[in-house]
Amino acid sequence: MNETLFSQIQRLFERTYAQVGINLEDCLIDRTRCAQLSILAGRSARELSELARTFLRRSGDQLYVGIYYSRWLIEQLEEHDPRAGLCDRNIRSLIMFVEEINHALHAALQFKSGMRQIASEDFARNLELQAQVDTYLVLLLFVAFFRKAQRVSRTDRRWLRFHLFTRQCPEAFRDKNLRGRYLETSELAARYTDYLDSLNGMRRLNEIRCFRSLDYGAKRERILALMDSGRN
């Protein structure tokens, strides 16, 4: 049976980091359930994208995950399958698709490791920063697959960075907390992925595995230290 794009991306993340222990595709929810969970999530959730969302809920020692994709987003990926090539018509949809899988996977891994404060701001920023870093690396793999000798050009990287980082508009959030979250994590992710671009394959793999194990504060300090060393 052919693998879905979803299962391929989950498997890629699990090979890179760790097995999550569940098929995240089983966590997909429909539009009705998404609307119900959005109401429960509170006022600030109204500003989040209606095209794709991940919901997390803790009940005792259980973590419940819901992943939502709009019909429009799925249709875009079906019509312009990124496995046949990445272009302006599918890159934004792929970014949202990958980020939600990444949110769910890392939330589950952190929960398994003992992190229970899933409602904290640091937890949310950690997931957002990790997702932007991992999504950039996934996009590089998609581009490299269709390049001779799997070489990604500077032009390719600028194009990816434009769609993943530059095109974001965190300033548009009315909620001060959301605005601060996305402004900070986008800046940190852009800086960190710039550093990752300077590493060879094995060093990059070791680096991102160590990076994933850090909490948000330590991730932030790691990136700021790299920025300081780069200026010296």
Image: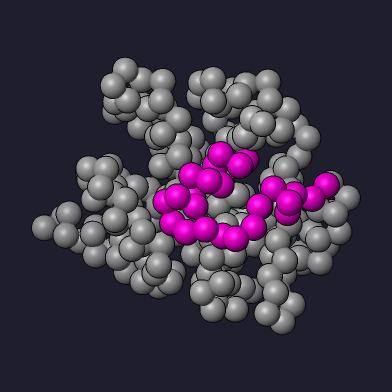
Q: Image height check: is 39 above or below 85? A: below
User: Horizontal placement of 232 versus 11: left or right?
Assistant: left
Camera-nearest residue between 220 and 231: 220
Camera-nearest residue between 141 and 127: 141
Residue 159, image x and y in percent? 41, 29
Residue 20, image x and y in percent? 56, 60
Q: Quadrant of residue 155?
A: top left
Query: Which residues are the magenta region?
Result: 6-30
The residue at the point 54 percent across, 78 percent down is 114
User: Horizontal placement of 29 versus 125: left or right?
Assistant: right
Among all residues in the image, which is located at the extreme left? Answer: 232
The residue at the point 45 percent across, 39 percent down is 138
Residue 130, image x and y in percent? 46, 56
Q: Quadrant of residue 92?
A: top right
Q: Is residue 176 magenta?
A: no
The residue at the point 64 percent across, 62 percent down is 175
Camera-nearest residue between 92 and 211: 211
Dominant SS of magenta comes to helix
Among all residues in the image, which is located at the extreme front? Answer: 1
Camera-nearest residue between 141 and 174: 141
Q: Quadrant of residue 9?
A: top right
Residue 26, can we see it?
Answer: yes
Among all residues in the image, which is located at the extreme top? Answer: 148
Residue 132, image x and y in percent? 47, 49
The residue at the point 64 percent across, 74 percent down is 119
- Rendered-image quadrant of the C terminus: bottom left
Residue 166, can we see it?
Answer: no
- Rendered-image quadrant of the N terminus: top right
**Color theme of the render:** one colour
